[in-house]
Amino acid sequence: MRTRPGVIEGNRLRSSLLLLNVIVAGAVVMVLELTGSRVITPIYGSSVMTWGGLIGVVLTSLSLGYAVSGALADRTSPRTLLKLLIISASIYILVTPTLSAIVLRELDPMLIDERLGVVLSSLMVLGPSTFLLGGVTPVALKLRASELSSIGKVSGNLYAYSTLGSIAGTFLTTFVLIPCSTPT
């Protein structure tokens, strides 16, 4: 059976766009984590406790996003779910600067335990967007995996692309974005 060239090209384009979504989601998670630290450390300091709370919240949110979105991808339209995840994360990220100012003003470190403050601040500022972005890769896996015999390779590749995005986001934020926003 012959396939039409447009179908193959359309599938390649769709596959490339799916990989791009996975890479960008991984990058944005790290951009959020590093820029989130710039918001939280002036209040709580740059101690191991602050960084541990921040990293712990990001990892917890990612983990929950993987699990919940993976389960939802089996019960709903993965294409629709992917769009909802990306749009919802984008909206939340857009309101994050305003939200973080409110959260950090209300969570006065003089009134609550520092550990609780770091975790609650990180959870409210970074938790929802990280949760939503964590869902991108398992949903992409649902869209990419065409046969069970290749699921290991497909999932390994997708998580590798997501991690490459995270690495790019880390270097971009650390060496370009933050230094450009810091007055000299």
Image: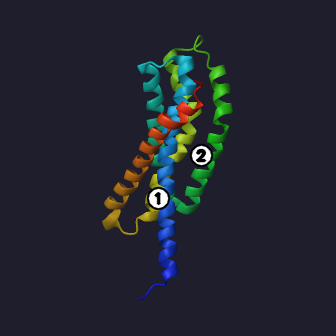
**Residue 109 seen in the figure:** yes
Residue 46 horizontal/vertical position (percent):
47, 19
Look at 42% across and 25% down and name the residue there: 52
Q: Point out residue 101 in the picture as x, y percentages from the top left corner.
A: 66, 26
Would you place residue 39 above or below residue 66 in this image?
above
Q: Tell me residue 161's x, y (percent).
A: 41, 53
Up the image or down, 72 lies above or below 110; here it is: below
Q: Which mark is residue 19?
A: 1
When the figure is inspected, residue 184 is found, relative to residue 64, above or below; the finding is: above
Q: Residue furthest bottom?
A: 1
Badge 1 crowding class, 10 Å Cα cut-off, few under 14, some 14 to 19, many 20 or more, is some
Determine the secondary structure under disc 1: helix
Colour setup of the view: rainbow
Observer able to see residue 135: no
Quadrant position of residue 100: top right
Three-letter amino acid code at disc 1? Leu
Is residue 70 or residue 27 the one in the foreground? 27
The quarter of the rendered structure image containing the C terminus is top right
Q: Nearer the viewer, mark 1 or mark 2?
A: 1
Q: Which residue is mark 2?
A: 89
Q: Please tell me how crowded label 2 is: few (under 14), some (14-19), or many (20+) other residues with Cα within 10 Å.
A: many
Judging depth in this view, the residue of 113 and 178 nearest the camera is 178
Q: Amino acid at mark 2?
A: Ala
Residue that lies at the very extreme toward the top in this rendered image: 110
Q: Is the N terminus in the top left, top right, bottom left or bottom right quadrant?
A: bottom left
Task: Give the residue drawn at x 43%, y 64%.
Answer: 144
